[in-house]
Amino acid sequence: MIESNNNDTDSCVVNLTHALLKDGPKFLSHTLVITERVAYLRPTIGAMMFCVIYIIVGGFLASLATYLLVVSTQYDLSIFVGSFGIAIGVFGISLIQPFLNRATFNKKSGIFDNRKDRNVKLKHIVSLQINNKMIKRKNALSYACFELNLLTEHGRRINILNHNNEDQLENDAALLGMFLGVEVKDFRREIIL
């Protein structure tokens, strides 16, 4: 817990054990890449291929619908296949969008930018934290997932990584902690499946 007191003797308590995000992938979605002045998250090939398959299948079905429309007079089949292909392609594009947004820690500009939240000055980052959570599905097996969050001196928490590969998340957290010169705090607790 972090408490901050100001002159009015008001205190603000932030519960660090709660996960920021409700959901999380059951695969390794991103890895950390560190250069001399910049650290950034790169989507894994497996995560990108998962999305690209939907886009390719959608494009194939839309092309098949066009072919059926030109070659035959089966308008209803062409419309059905084309609509289904477009829906699958749009779904693939919506899946790939979060992977294309790059979160960066830039030492030259002194800014963390994830293109979702307000930018954070690197000097305001006080620590990184690792949390775990249980993802529960109605009609599927539950699984453990992990978050890597940054914590600022003003009590903000911002999610950096969210996936279920614990070893990779620990490694990325340690490397990022060294890059930023901050402590990595472990708030994981035992999860019972």
Image (cartoon, rainbow, N blue to C red):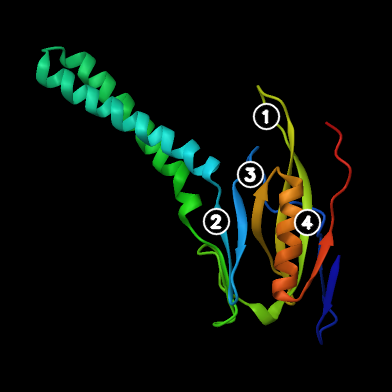
Question: Dot 3 surroundings within 10 Å: few (below 14), some, or many (20 or more)?
Answer: some
Q: Residue furthest front?
A: 36
Measured from the top left, where is residue 152 in percent x and y? 72, 73
What amino acid is found at the position of numbered circle 2 in the picture? Arg
Q: Name the residue under label 2.
A: 42
Q: Mark 1 points at which residue?
A: 137
Q: Which numbered disc flags the more N-terminal residue, 2 or 4?
A: 2
Q: Do the residues labelled 3 and 4 touch (CB within 8 Å)?
A: no
Q: Are marks 2 and 1 in contact (CB under 8 Å)?
A: no
Nearer mark to the viewer, of 3 and 4? 3
Using the image, determine if residue 133 lies above or below residue 156.
above
- The residue shown at (67%, 29%) is 137
Measured from the top left, where is residue 166 in percent x and y? 76, 46
Q: Quadrant of residue 145?
A: top right
Q: Which numbered disc flags the more N-terminal residue, 3 or 4?
A: 3
| Kind of element beneath mark 3 | loop
